[in-house]
Image (cartoon, rainbow, N blue to C red):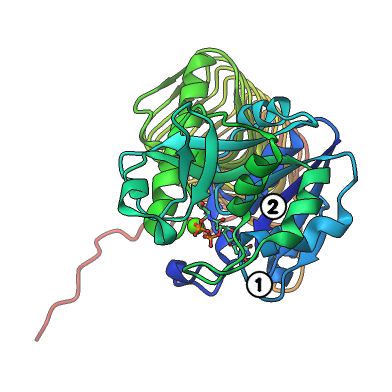
Amino acid sequence: MIDVIILAAGQGSRMRSTKPKVLHEIGGKPMVNHVVDAALCLPDVSLHLVVGHGSEAVQASLTTPCHIVEQKEQLGTAHAVLQALPNLSPNAKVLILYADVPLIDAETLQRMVNAVDSHCMAVLTTELDDATGYGRIVRSDMGAVTDIVEHKDATQEQRDIAEINTGIMCVPQAYLSRWLPRIENNNAQHEYYLPDIIAMAVAEGVGIKTPQPKCFYEVEGVNNRQQLAFLERKYQQQISDRLMLEGVTLADPARIDIRGSLSVGQDVFIDINAVFSGNVVIGDGVSIGPNCVISDATIGAASEIYANTVIESATLGQQCKVGPFARLRPGAALANHVKVGNYVEVKNASLANGSKVNHLSYIGDAKIGNDTNVGAGTITCNYDGAYKHKTVLGDNVFIGSNSTLVAPLDIADGSFIGAGSTITEAVPKENLAIGRGRQKNIAGWKKPEKN
Ligand code: UD1
Ligand code: CA
């Protein structure tokens, strides 16, 4: 069994934010939740979150239940881990993670855990060109780890060491419970340093393994917004790499943002500056034009979304064509072969197979049948100031341009609405409805003249 302790008590003052640091987002998800999700990939885990600054907000953001431990004063990393100690199982391997080191990979964590048995512990280390600020890994001539010294406590010779403590450790509970209470704070920062357990392990002859992360940014922490932006790009790069390996063509892998989950079929094309959020599912052969913003949507195979289209909580069937400059709002449901063109807004409305709304229209709270054609500038007047009402159009209906459809309204199959009509009453099957002032031509008209 694995007890994972995630340290999330720090204030993060360098973020200059009213929000606790660990709630700042990478890929639309709070950093703390990235760490929780990585830990959840391990088998048989129990999660312990050490909170302090902004603890209520941090707890509220959790999507997975964790044992919450309050660290009232931040007296150091050893002190933080000590707070969780009473809740750990006696036989557990204890994995210590940081909520502000968001891109740690589950596979690296698994290697950490695998490296540990009842006779040894593990510290995740890496080498940095500039190790300033980090704890240094001190080794004997034989290469065995003998100590970790914090930058502020290190000698010049120790500061030249490139190998650093990432902070991530895995330690059998039996050792941790013996060592933690013995740690003192007589050091440069007057803090209780977790890395002080290394010297204790050495003194007791407990083995110290030093696995390495696969990528350096797995162990990069976030202290300010520059570092947040840096890791955001790394995270986006990971996703775009995965998408391309899954068969997606990206016009520019550096100009796509995914803030949630995007699952794709084969031969999908995504142009520049597309932003995806929530859960988006895209079928085979779909193409997404430049500058589209798509959230919580399903897009069926071979559909084409043209430039500058915004889609939110909508479903599209196969071979639809949407945009450019279209807006599908929550509840828009397009069946197959549906066209929604430029400057058309669709909200809470279904369009059955082959229907078209090609230009400059508002379709809200409506149900549109098969092969119906809604002309340019058509408005469903769905709101009476108090209530929303529904517009129902049957199959093969033709709505002339610039029509005003005052809901509640039923326009039956095969009927035809003359352009410029204001329609307030039901139209029976296969009728022509015209609701507008008749045109009058006045012969010999002279335009007024100034005296
Ligand atoms: C720590 C390590 C250092 C390592 C570095 C890697 C110690 C003493 N030093 O240094 O060897 O190279 O991480 O980034 O551990 N925290 C709490 N409660 C506390 C103190 C810290 O929750 O009382 C949390 C902080 O919010 C932060 C993390 O623990 O997320 C690390 O603490 P920090 O003080 O930043 O340690 P470093 O000085 O970076
Ligand atoms: Ca730090």
Instruction: Work out whether 299 lies above or below 203.
Output: above
Secondary structure at badge 1 equals loop
The kind of residue tagged 1 is Gly
Place of residue 185 in the rendered image (x, y in percent of width and height, measured from the top left): 60, 68
- Asked if residue 439 lies left or right of residue 316, the reply is left
Q: Residue at x 19, y 70 (%)?
A: 447
Q: Position of residue 345 (x, y in %)?
A: 55, 48
Q: Position of residue 312 (x, y in %)?
A: 60, 46
Mark 1 burial class by Cα count in 10 Å: few <14, some 14-19, many 20+: some
Q: Quadrant of residue 198?
A: top right
Mark 2 to mark 1: distance in Å?
15 Å
Q: Which residue is at the front of the view, 13 or 399?
A: 13
Q: Which mark is residue 6?
A: 2
Residue that appears at 52% across and 29% down: 212
Tag 2's secondary structure?
strand
Q: What residue is rendered at 34% in x and 49% in y?
A: 159
Callout in the foreground (2, 1): 2
The answer to whether 379 appears left or right of 59 in the picture is left
Going from N to C along the chain, the mark reached first, 2 or 1, is 2
- Report the quarter where the C terminus lies: bottom left
**Residue pointed to by mark 1:** 54
- Residue 281 visible to an observer of this rendering: yes
**Is there CB contact under 8 Å for labels 2 and 1?**
no
Q: Residues within 10 Å of mark 2 (few under 14, many from 20)?
A: many
Q: Is residue 70 left or right of residue 145?
A: right
Disc 2 CB within 8 Å of nearest ligand 1 atom = no
Question: Is residue 358 visible to us here?
Answer: no
Indicate whether 299 appears above or below 448.
above
Residue type at the position of mark 2? Ile
- Provide residue 204's location: percent of width, then percent of height: 71, 41
Residue drawn at x 80%, y 32% is: 118
Residue 156 left/right relative to 77: left
